[in-house]
Image (tube, rainbow, N blue to C red):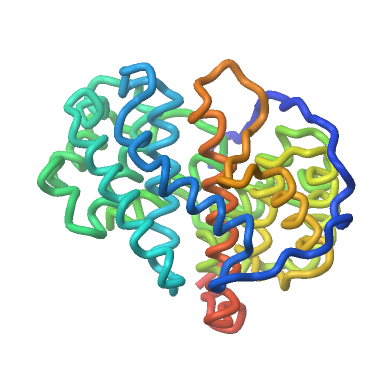
């Protein structure tokens, strides 16, 4: 096993009303109101994904946005979808394809740092589901690039190795990365969820995403973690940290936690933070407005779609065990 480590910055919070003051928001079209608004915002802003705001498609923040959009599209489309979401997701997929066609972007897997390769795998997988990847990057070319860059040997935190494992598994490639149960053993989820450090909380949500493959696998001991997840959800919603609020709502859906008063209140707080068009800005950073806003909107929409899929399929009874 590789020695694990993790690090991260601390986001700045702004004050907000205590979650719950507005009461739980209603569900329309199988989605929470804030999630539906956020999805509508992504629909209106879809073309922003197709062109970098500063004209540089190799900028790290832009490539991160595309990789997260790709992961979102690949995961949500494997579950039942509300009818209204389908054309929006199709539009976002077309925007992703237009971005990926730029040779400065698709060629980055050969010329950029090896750490960036996993994001390109995510983009390729999302487009491949619609038959759009091969015309831009034949699968064998992608595999050859991954082998040439030896991306499995690039040092990274444990959670990122798990992310890599999921990507390589989805490509159908053989590797010698540890099993999911090994990753669970080093995750220290209880400790991360007991922390008040923002970097630890981000690490916790991402462990929950990847250990469950966004809800596909049942997480052993999840029931014992849910009370701490609820506490941290209330904390970040009270602090007005909408990025983490959305991530904890999505993490709750990944472990199939039943919606309760805390999650209802967090959704209500998210809704109060939105403008009428569905826009929600993430932590203040020196970045273009779209890059600052898209992540919170994306994860809020994702959490709403995941919760709706859980209600529709009763996924808690049908998901596969982590160790299987």
- Identity of the residue drawn at 44% across and 52% down: 72
- Please state which of residues 163 and 89 is positioned toward the viewer in this rendering: 89
Position of residue 198 measured from the top left corner of the image (x, y, whole percent): 75, 34
Position of residue 36 measured from the top left corner of the image (x, y, whole percent): 55, 59
- Identity of the residue drawn at 89% across and 55% down: 21
Residue 13 sits in quarter: top right
Left or right relative to 32: residue 172: left
Position of residue 202 measured from the top left corner of the image (x, y, whole percent): 67, 40
- Identity of the residue drawn at 44% across and 71% down: 81
Note whether 252 is above or below 317 in the view shown: above
Left or right relative to 186: residue 55: left
Residue farthest along the front direction in this orientation: 276
Left or right relative to 71: residue 241: right
- Please state which of residues 31 and 59 is positioned toward the viewer in this rendering: 31
- Count the numbered circles shown: 0
Quadrant of the rendering where the N terminus is positioned: top right
Position of residue 28 measured from the top left corner of the image (x, y, whole percent): 59, 70
Note whether 259 is above or below 151 in the view shown: below
- Identity of the residue drawn at 56% across and 45% down: 277
- Please state which of residues 140 and 179 is positioned toward the viewer in this rendering: 140
């Amino acid at each position: 096993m590789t020695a694990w480590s993790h690090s991260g910055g601390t986001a700045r919070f702004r004050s907000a009303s205590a979650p719950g003051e507005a009461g739980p928001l209603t569900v329309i079209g199988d989605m929470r109101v804030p999630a539906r608004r956020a999805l509508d915002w992504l629909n209106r802003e879809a073309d922003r994904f197709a062109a970098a705001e500063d004209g540089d498609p190799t900028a790290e923040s832009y490539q991160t946005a595309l990789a997260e959009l790709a992961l979102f599209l690949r995961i949500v489309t494997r579950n039942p979808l509300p009818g209204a979401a389908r054309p929006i997701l199709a539009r976002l997929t077309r925007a992703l394809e237009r971005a990926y066609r730029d040779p400065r972007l698709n060629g980055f897997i050969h010329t950029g740092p090896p750490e960036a390769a996993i994001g390109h795998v995510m983009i390729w997988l999302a487009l491949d589901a619609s038959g759009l990847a091969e015309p831009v990057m034949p699968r064998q070319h992608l595999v050859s690039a991954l082998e040439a860059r030896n991306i499995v040997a690039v040092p990274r935190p444990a959670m990122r190795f798990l992310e890599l494992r999921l990507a390589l598994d989805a490509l159908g490639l053989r590797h010698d990365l540890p099993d999911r149960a090994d990753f669970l053993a080093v995750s220290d989820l209880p400790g991360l969820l007991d922390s008040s450090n923002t970097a630890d909380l981000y690490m916790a949500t991402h462990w929950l995403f990847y250990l469950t493959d966004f809800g596909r696998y049942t997480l052993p001991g999840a029931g014992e973690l849910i009370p701490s997840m609820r506490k941290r959800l209330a904390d970040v919603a009270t602090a007005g940290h909408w990025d983490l609020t959305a991530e904890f709502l999505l993490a709750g859906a990944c472990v199939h936690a039943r919606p309760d008063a805390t999650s209802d209140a967090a959704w209500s707080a998210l809704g109060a933070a939105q403008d009428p068009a569905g826009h929600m800005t993430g932590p203040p950073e020196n970045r273009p407005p779209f890059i600052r806003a898209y992540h919170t909107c994306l994860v809020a929409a994702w959490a709403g779609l995941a919760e709706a899929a859980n209600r529709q399929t009763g996924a808690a009874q049908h998901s596969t065990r982590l160790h299987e």
